[in-house]
Amino acid sequence: MLALNYSKYKFECGTDEAGRGCLAGPVTAAAVILPDDFKNSILNDSKQLTEIKRDALKPVIELESISFGVAHIFPDVIDEINILNASILAMQEAITKLTPQPQFISVDGNKFKPYNDIPHATIIKGDGKFLNIAAASVLAKTYRDAYMNTIHEEFPMYNWKKNKGYPTKEHREAIKKYGVTKYHRQSFRLLPDQLKLDL
């Protein structure tokens, strides 16, 4: 069973991101403050859940949380500041949307930058340990997937509806065949070295 929170603060938020390893699309983060009495037997790290379960949990989290926020950081910014900084920025932007602002921030992973002098802890695999981080992981994943499904309509040849921008064989074959789009991250190795593109 996942614990609710990491700290003893009343308003602790969990935060997590989705899409760090993708070749296209934003990195998306969510931040969630859950009430003391929140319980859910299904909620877990979004990667451990099926799409059906994630989609079922999304409205539950939105309805039952004290507050939640979601933020996308798009490829032009990722290319400018790098993916690690973009991931942290996405989490911080998601936190800015919380009302009330948290008294403590629990971060999935091992990297974060201080935000508004609010104490924080980085927790490796935190999305499998604490419900508030798991809730953030589900929102980050579902909001990002919805965005990728939308831009799939514009560029269906990359099949983002299925691969969500991750470096699958099919996605790389499409990049090789059709080139790159405005949604691709130019700073990423979009193709293996032997398949260099003239950008």
Image: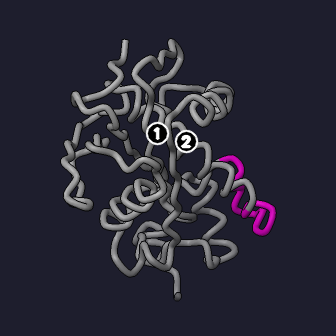
Quadrant location of the N terminus in the rendered image: top left
Q: For label 2, count other residues whose C-alpha is less than 10 Å away and answer few (under 14), some (14-19) or many (20+).
A: many
User: Which residue type does callout 1 highlight?
Assistant: Ser
Magenta-highlighted stretch: main secondary structure? Answer: helix
Q: Amino acid at mark 2?
A: Leu
Q: Which residues are magenta?
A: 151-162
Residue 104 image point, x, y percent: 26, 42
Circle 1 residues within 10 Å: few <14, some 14–19, many ≥20 = many
Residue located 30% across and 33% down the image? 126
Above/below status of 126 relative to 99: above
Q: Are marks 1 and 2 in contact (CB under 8 Å)?
A: yes
Q: Nearer the viewer, residue 10 or 145?
A: 10
Give me the C-alpha separation between circle 1 and circle 2.
6 Å
Instruction: Tell me residue 192's x, y (percent).
Output: 43, 66
> What residue is disc 2 on?
139
> Which residue was labeled with disc 1?
137
In this view, the residue in front, 168 or 102, is 102
